[in-house]
Amino acid sequence: MIIAFASKNHLGLNSELGSNISQSEYFTVVELEGAKLKKVRNVENVYFRQEVDAVAFAEFIKETKAEKLVVSSVENADITKELLKGNVSVDEAREGRIADLLEDFQNSETR
């Protein structure tokens, strides 16, 4: 599974989860094999401090091959609708360090 976490900066798993898409400077893209971490990369957010066009954003996330987007809050329902059309689920999560959020996800996968 590939998960894109909205992130406040480029510190990868040590980044804090972004409050929303336009306030997140990067996406930390995490690839899991089962519940095991396989790869982590940072992708610069072209929508940082910009208005987010739902269709274009869904295409941008699709290019990362993410199956799930995790962010504290999605700006509008159209973004979620467009992502779901492209088979990308959206999880709104509490703000915190991405490594901790990922660990919670991995633990839920192994149960």
Image: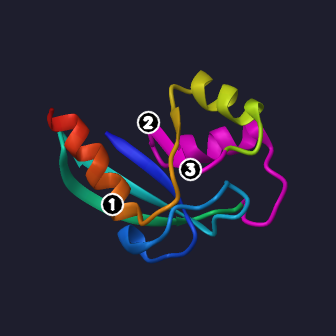
74 relative to 98, above or below = above
Q: Nearer the viewer, residue 19 or 45?
A: 19
Residue position for label 2? 67
Nearer-N-terminus badge (2/1):
2
Vertical order, 85 against 59 (above or below)? above
**Lower position in the chain sequence, tag 1 or tag 3:** 3
Q: Nearer the viewer, residue 55 or 73?
A: 73
- Front of the two marks 2 and 1: 1
- Residue type of the residue flagged with mark 1: Asp
- Residue 48 colored magenta? yes
Question: Identity of the amino acid at label 2?
Answer: Glu
Tell me which colouring the rendered structure shows.
rainbow
Q: Which residues are magenta?
A: 47-73
Element on which disc 1 rests: helix
Q: In the rendered view, does 50 fall on the left or right side of 8?
A: right
Q: Which residue is mark 3?
A: 71
The nearer-to-camera label among 1 and 3 is 1
Q: Residue at x 82, y 61 (%)?
A: 50
Where is residue 88 shown, x and y percent of the image? 51, 32
Query: x, y (%) of residue 102?
Result: 32, 53
Is 105 in the magenta?
no
Please state if 31 lies on the left or on the right of 15 as rendered.
left
Q: Which mark is residue 100?
A: 1
Identify which amino acid the numbered label 3 is placed on: Val
